[in-house]
Amino acid sequence: MKKNLLVALILGFIAIFSTGCMESPQDEETKQKEDTLNGNAMDSYNDDGVDGQVGYVRFKKDQLDQSKERNREIKVNREQVADMVSRMILRYDGFEDVAALVTDNEVLVAYQKPEDYSRKQAADMVQKTAYSLVPSFYHVYVSDDPAAFGDIQSVSTSTVYDEQYDEVIESIVKKMKKAPQGNVPQDDMDQPDVGPNMDVKPNTEE
C-alpha cells in the first residue's frame, strides 16, 4: 500500500514538473514582449534574427510616447564599432597596427603608416573607412604618430561620465589633428557638430 502511494506521489510530482516546464517558454515569451509595443502597426518585428537576416521595424507615431522618445538615447555599441573600424583598416595591404577609440561623438584612430603610402594617402584611407562605418553625427580623427596609440589607450577604460572626460578627449584630438586628417573636412555638412545624445543644440540662426 505504501509502495503504491509512493509511486503515485512520484508520478504526481513528475506531472506537475512537466506542466511547469511546458509553460515556461510561454511565460518567457510573454516577458520578452512586455517591453515591445502592442498593435499591428509594428510590422514583423524580428526578435531573434538569424544570421544574414535583414533588420526591419515599422512603427506608427501614435504608438510611441513622444515625450519619452525625445529623451531616448540613440545607443551605439562603441566596443563593436571600434572593433569593426580596426579590422576593416587592417584589411588594407601594408597596415599592420591599428587602434580605434569610439566615444559618444568621435572616432579616434591611431595607425602605423604603410611604407608604400604617403602620410596623406594613408590618412585619407583610414578616415574614410571609419566614416563609412559610423553614424553621420560622428567626427573621425586619425594619426600616424606613434604617441597616439598611448593617448588612445590612456582613456580606453573611461566612460563619458568621468570627471574631465571632455577635456581629456579634446586634448587628444588636438594632438591628433597635427597629423594629416584625410580629405573629409571636419566642417562637412554631413558631419554635424553635435550628435543626438548631446545636450547642446545646433545653431540654426542665419
Image (spheres, rainbow, N blue to C red):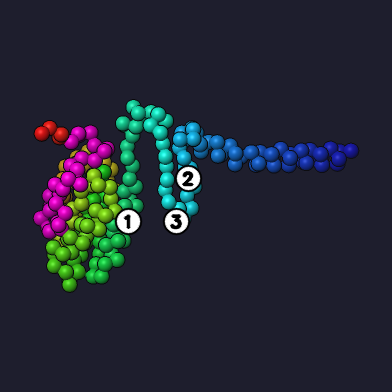
Disc 2: which residue: 46
Q: What residue lies at 25% left-to-right and 58% top-to-bottom?
A: 129
Q: Amino acid at mark 3?
A: Gly
Q: Where on the picture, by quarter, is residue 26?
A: top right
Q: Amino acid at mark 1?
A: Asp
Q: What main secondary structure does the magenta stretch of the protein show?
A: loop
Q: First in sequence: mark 3 or mark 1?
A: 3
Disc 3: which residue: 52
- Vertical position of residue 103 compared to residue 197: above or below: below
Please tell me how crowded label 3 is: few (under 14), some (14-19), or many (20+) other residues with Cα within 10 Å: few
Quadrant in the picture for the N terminus: top right
Give the Cα distance between marks 3 and 2.
13 Å
Disc 1: which residue: 83
Q: First in sequence: mark 2 or mark 1?
A: 2
Tell me residue 10's x, y (percent).
77, 41
Tell me residue 66's x, y (percent).
35, 28
Nearer the viewer's eye, disc 2 or disc 1? 2
Q: First in sequence: mark 3 or mark 2?
A: 2
Q: What residue lies at 20% left-to-right and 57% top-to-bottom?
A: 127
Tell me residue 89's x, y (percent).
27, 62
Please tell me how crowded label 1 is: few (under 14), some (14-19), or many (20+) other residues with Cα within 10 Å: some
User: Is 158 displayed left or right of 187 in the figure?
Assistant: right
Q: Secondary structure at mark 1?
A: helix
Quadrant in the picture for the C terminus: top left
The residue range painted magenta reads: 174-202
Q: Is residue 24 visible?
A: yes
The extreme right residue here reads 1
Nearer the viewer's eye, disc 3 or disc 1? 3
- The magenta stretch spans residue 158: no
Tell me residue 133's x, y (percent).
29, 53
